[in-house]
């Protein structure tokens, strides 16, 4: 059995991670931690664990925890992980960081967008890898520190990756219009996510300044072989969970939609969790809710010569906890789908 610790288990992503790990046949959860709920039973915070969990929150002492487990999941705010993870810790236990500290390879870009100092440049440069399984599967197993991607980024990158190195796209024309459920803002109290503030409304936020922008740009640039700069606009939608990303990119030459479909099919032929939908069908968040799937729909506007790719994921599963478990499966040589076979929940 894989001995597991979840540091920061009280948030939404942490709770989803605990739920998935309890269903995993190869996992034994040894430790959960919280900064403010020490000694509190987990099932007193989340009633869905009554008769399923006897765990209590412990102190966030990663130096101690790493000696007793095989892997530590960090579900912490940005700026924390880079100050507590060390080479000594990753020599004792593998780390999957659900936060942002190791996602962006350029330290100056990270510090500028997140307005904080990074705590360990050496780990970032030498010991971490970006854990988007569908892109880095072959190399993830070589590392002990995995940067679990963000939710908007996962959906956007998977939607666009197959075409980013193609000559028939205008790489300067990329626009991503994305929507997220309220859980994407986390569990902390914020007036903007109170029911009466966000119900029956939709709004754009952090326009031209959302912190997932450089993460998306960096990963798409790697595929494209050149620097990609894009317009990314997130929106808050009054639903609990889900990401829908509508991506627009101009074409530089005429191409048939069947040819684009063939490119996507070939790119994702070995990826169980990416579902390419049939022509005329576009993703809906309700069909991925509670699952680790990413659904992708392809549309070609011949009138404006624009490719429109729509992606959908559950922000707490494929956009966070499910992807973390998928990374763990790769690290320990398990089938990637282990513990992640749930079909989307419908209706909700």
Image (cartoon, rainbow, N blue to C red):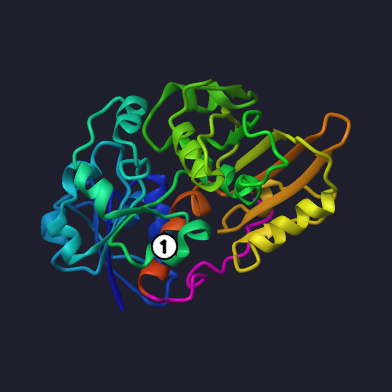
- Above or below: residue 221 compared with residue 272: above
240 sits left or right of 173 in the view:
left
Decide whether residue 192 is among the magenta residues.
Answer: no
Figure label count: 1
Residue 51 appears in the rendering: no
* Residue 275 position within the rendered picture, expressed as x and y whole percent measured from the top left: 68, 59
Quadrant of residue 327 in the image?
Answer: bottom left
Q: Residues within 10 Å of mark 1 (few under 14, many from 20)?
A: many
Decide whether residue 338 is among the magenta residues.
Answer: yes
Of 234 and 3, which appears nearest the observer? 234
Q: Which residues are magenta?
A: 333-348
Q: Main secondary structure of the magenta part?
A: loop
* Residue 88 position within the rendered picture, expressed as x and y whole percent measured from the top left: 12, 58
Query: Residue drawn 52% across and 44% down?
Result: 225
Query: Residue drawn 16% across and 60% down?
Result: 65
- Above or below: residue 328 compared with residue 36: below
Query: Residue drawn 56% across and 44% down?
Result: 224
125 sits left or right of 332 in the view:
left
* Quarter in which the N terminus is drawn: bottom left
* Residue 48 position within the rendered picture, expressed as x and y whole percent measured from the top left: 44, 57
- Above or below: residue 286 compared with residue 79: below
- Above or below: residue 171 compared with residue 267: above
* Residue 138 position within the rendered picture, expressed as x and y whole percent measured from the top left: 45, 66
Residue 58 appears in the rendering: yes
**Which residue was labeled with disc 1?**
327
Mark 1 lies on a secondary structure that is helix
Quadrant of residue 100 in the image?
Answer: top left
Of 254 and 33, which appears nearest the observer? 254
Of 98 and 128, which appears nearest the observer? 128
């Amino acid at each position: 059995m894989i001995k597991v610790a979840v540091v920061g288990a009280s948030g939404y992503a942490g709770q989803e991670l605990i739920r998935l790990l309890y269903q995993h046949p190869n996992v034994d959860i040894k430790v959960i931690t919280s900064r403010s709920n020490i000694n509190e039973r987990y099932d007193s915070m989340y009633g869905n664990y009554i008769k399923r969990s006897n765990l209590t929150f412990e102190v966030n002492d990663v130096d101690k925890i790493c000696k007793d487990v095989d892997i530590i999941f960090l579900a912490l705010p940005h700026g924390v992980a880079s100050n507590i993870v060390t080479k000594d810790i990753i020599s004792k236990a593998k780390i999957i960081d659900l936060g942002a500290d190791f996602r962006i390879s350029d330290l100056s870009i990270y510090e500028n967008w997140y307005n904080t100092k990074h705590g360990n440049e050496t780990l970032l440069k030498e010991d971490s890898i970006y854990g988007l399984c569908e892109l880095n599967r072959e190399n993830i197993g070589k590392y002990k520190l995995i940067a679990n991607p963000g939710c908007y980024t996962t959906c956007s990158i998977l939607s666009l990756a197959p075409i980013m190195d193609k000559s028939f796209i205008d790489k300067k024309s990329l626009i991503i219009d994305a929507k997220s459920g309220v859980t994407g803002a986390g569990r902390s109290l914020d007036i903007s996510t109170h029911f009466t503030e966000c119900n029956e409304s939709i709004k754009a936020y952090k326009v031209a300044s959302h912190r997932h922008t450089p993460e998306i740009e960096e990963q798409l640039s790697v595929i494209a072989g050149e620097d990609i700069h894009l317009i990314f606009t997130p929106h808050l939608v009054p639903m609990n969970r889900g990401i829908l990303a509508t991506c627009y990119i101009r074409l530089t030459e005429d191409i048939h939609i069947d040819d684009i479909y063939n490119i996507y099919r070939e790119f994702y032929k070995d990826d169980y969790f990416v579902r390419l939908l049939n022509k005329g069908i576009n993703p809906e968040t309700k069909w991925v809710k509670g699952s680790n799937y990413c659904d992708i729909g392809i549309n070609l506007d011949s009138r404006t010569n624009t490719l429109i790719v729509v992606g959908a994921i559950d922000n707490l599963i494929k956009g966070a906890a499910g992807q973390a478990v998928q990374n763990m499966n790769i690290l320990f040589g398990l089938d990637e789908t282990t513990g992640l076979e749930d079909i989307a929940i419908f209706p909700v």
